[in-house]
Amino acid sequence: MKAVSFLLLAASMLAGIPAFAQVDFSGEWAQLRHEDSSTNPEVGDRLGVPLNAAGRMRADALNVGIWSVPEWQCRPHPATFSWRGTGETRITKVVDPVTRLTTAFRVERKRNFDQFIYLDERPHPSEDAAHTWGGFSTGKWDGDMLTITTTHIKEGYLRMNGIPSSDRTTITERWIRHDNYLFVVMSINDPVYLEEPFVVSGQYRLDLKLDMQITPCIVIDESPEARGVIPHYLPWDNPYRTEFADMYKIPAKALDDGAETMYPKYQSKLKTYSGN
């Protein structure tokens, strides 16, 4: 009876302990770009992104000269873009010195912030808490797949051609490892600029010889004639708005169809457009 009582007590204690790492994602990962290389597409290319009217208007306001402004040259990429835009990534385990359990994963990226994925079931901060480039991330295990929820992200972009993301964006990531390959699927939810979640994925290969060298950022005033001016266009005044559509002979109306452009059946609608 004493043995049974001890086992029941141990089981009840373990039931209250959060589930920690089941798969080791640590290592240095090189990005494979054969799946999606649209991280920095042409201005005006928003096909396949479920932008709503507000998102399209914000995208049209982009003047690429903004990247030459000193305040923008050394800004980190936001969490909405970091997996697909920074290349090399290092993941390390954060181990509790007493229990020796992995309580978090630390993600380091080239030219970017460090992100911590907490596994100890801590709650997310209040809505009024500060927003950062990486946001606040917690992870839960679903078998060998790690599901990560990220909130409190600064306003940023989905692509560097002006596709916006708001500070109300949340991200659900799923990490899956098969041998030396890491698969990351992101579902980006933005009630301000998106009609529905924007789902993207990426693949990474373990590289034992990967060298993540420091890349210091040196600010240069590249446009002295525009000093004190923030490059932008007013709504519908961007002269390059249809340049992408004209280049690839795509009807300009297609640029405003948002989520419809994500699905194969959109090809039928596209055929109904004239060449304007």
Image (cartoon, rainbow, N blue to C red):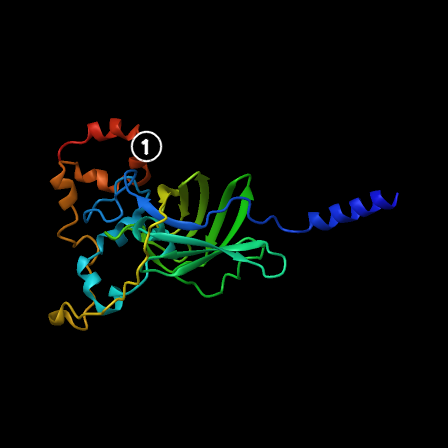
Along the viewing direction, whichever of 63 and 146 lies nearer the viewer = 146
Q: Up-down: is 265 above or below 58? A: above
- What residue is rendered at 50% in x and 61% in y? 127
Type of the residue with mark 1? Tyr
Q: Which residue is at 79% across, 48% downward?
A: 9
| Residue designated by label 1 | 263
Quadrant of the drawing holding the N terminus = top right
Horizontal side of residue 154 vs 15, given as left or right = left
Observer-nearest of 2 and 50:
2
Query: In terms of depth relative to the viewer, which is nearer, 77 or 49?
Result: 77
Q: Find numbered disc 1 in the image and state the secondary structure of the residue it sits on.
A: loop
Q: Can residue 21 be seen in this view?
A: yes
Image quadrant containing the C terminus: top left
At x 55%, y 39%, the residue is 143
Above-or-below relation of 219 to 174:
below
Question: Would residue 190 be seen by someone viewing this image from the given angle?
Answer: no
Nearest the viewer among 228 and 187 is: 187
